[in-house]
Image (tube, rainbow, N blue to C red):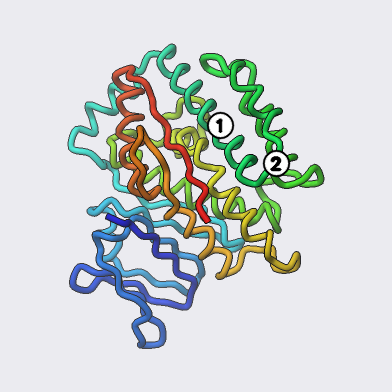
Amino acid sequence: MNLRVVAVTGPAWLALQNRAVIVQREGSTLGRIPLEDVAIIVIDGPDVTISHQLLRQAVANKIAVVIADEKHVPSGVLLPLAGHSTHTAILRSQIAAAKPSLKRTWQTIVRAKVLAQAHLLEDRHLDSKSVRRLLPFIRSGDPDNIEGQAASKYFDLAFGEDFKRQRNADGINGLLNYGYAVLRAAVARAIVGAGLHPALGIHHQNQYNAFCLADDAMEPLRPLIDWTTLKYIDQADPDDVAVTPKTKRILVAALGQKVLLQDQESPLLVGLDRYAANLRRAICDGDELHCPIPRFEQ
């Protein structure tokens, strides 16, 4: 199965017809995608209308509906309240999860993220030694914040020392913010589908964040967005480095990249379901977590 992301910039009308998502503009049908092939619908624009019937079926079919704000950054996600047949039992286990097990799980996530960052640097023929040498120092729970140390070195190497990572900036940051937000929605969709509650994080614990667990789980996959952004700016005019319909399509397409999980390669949106199921076992049963490894493909 090759799941797809439907990203719509208005004006447009989205509806359901014969078990297919249809996108119309000025009376003409722009696209028709079978419902079972859709993983995420991104609505970007105040003049996009979506039918109630489609929203109902999106929830029933575990499709995440993402709403972007006036800066074109996804700011809200519609997900099913219960995405698994044993949701309540899983939720109780998630709440009661042992702290030592959660710390080991976070250690695994951080290690996978740092490795992915090193792989990206190597793919771009950059020196990854300063990032790789931090790997042996990642302890249970990452009390030394190796994640932050590695990120600082990594962004300097990948984007240049003049680049500063900011969540509310434009330019390169705007592209990263958009890509991360769509990735976050995809991870949240998979987490809910596995029966986990996305607000109950492992490391992220902000009481105002409804997607703490998604923020935890997506960390090893962020370099896919970084790689996609870098590939774009390699060829783009500096004046074109902004969130536009073109760059949104490029960033959304990153979710079609391949990942490797336990020796099985698959598109990211498919691999996320297996990753989320493994994450549930790690949190609720104390199993070892296996994180997806991004494949940087041309």
Please name the residue shown 62% across and 63% down the image: 243
The amino acid marked with disc number 2 is Leu
- The residue pinned by badge 2 equals 126
Residue 291 circle label: none
- Report how far apart the C-alphas of labels 2 and 1 lie in the structure: 14 Å
Label 1 CA crowd tier, 10 Å (few <14, some 14–19, many 20+): many
Across and down, in percent, residue 249 comes to 51, 65
The amino acid marked with disc number 1 is Leu
Q: Residue furthest front?
A: 125
Is the residue 153 above or below the residue 295 in the image? above
> What quarter of the picture does the N terminus occupy?
bottom left
Pick the front one: 95 or 155:
155
Q: Nearer the viewer, mark 2 or mark 1?
A: 2
Pick the front one: 60 or 31:
31
Is the residue 154 above or below the residue 137 in the image? below
Across and down, in percent, residue 74 comes to 51, 55
- Per the image, label 1 sits on a secondary structure element best described as helix
Across and down, in percent, residue 24 comes to 36, 80
Q: Residue furthest right?
A: 162
Please name the residue shown 75% across and 64% down the image: 238
Give the number of callouts.
Answer: 2
As drawn, is 99 to the left or to the right of 81?
right
Q: Residue furthest bottom?
A: 27
As drawn, is 33 to the left or to the right of 248?
left
Pick the front one: 182 or 270:
270
- Per the image, label 2 sits on a secondary structure element best described as loop
Residue 115 circle label: 1
Across and down, in percent, residue 201 comes to 45, 29
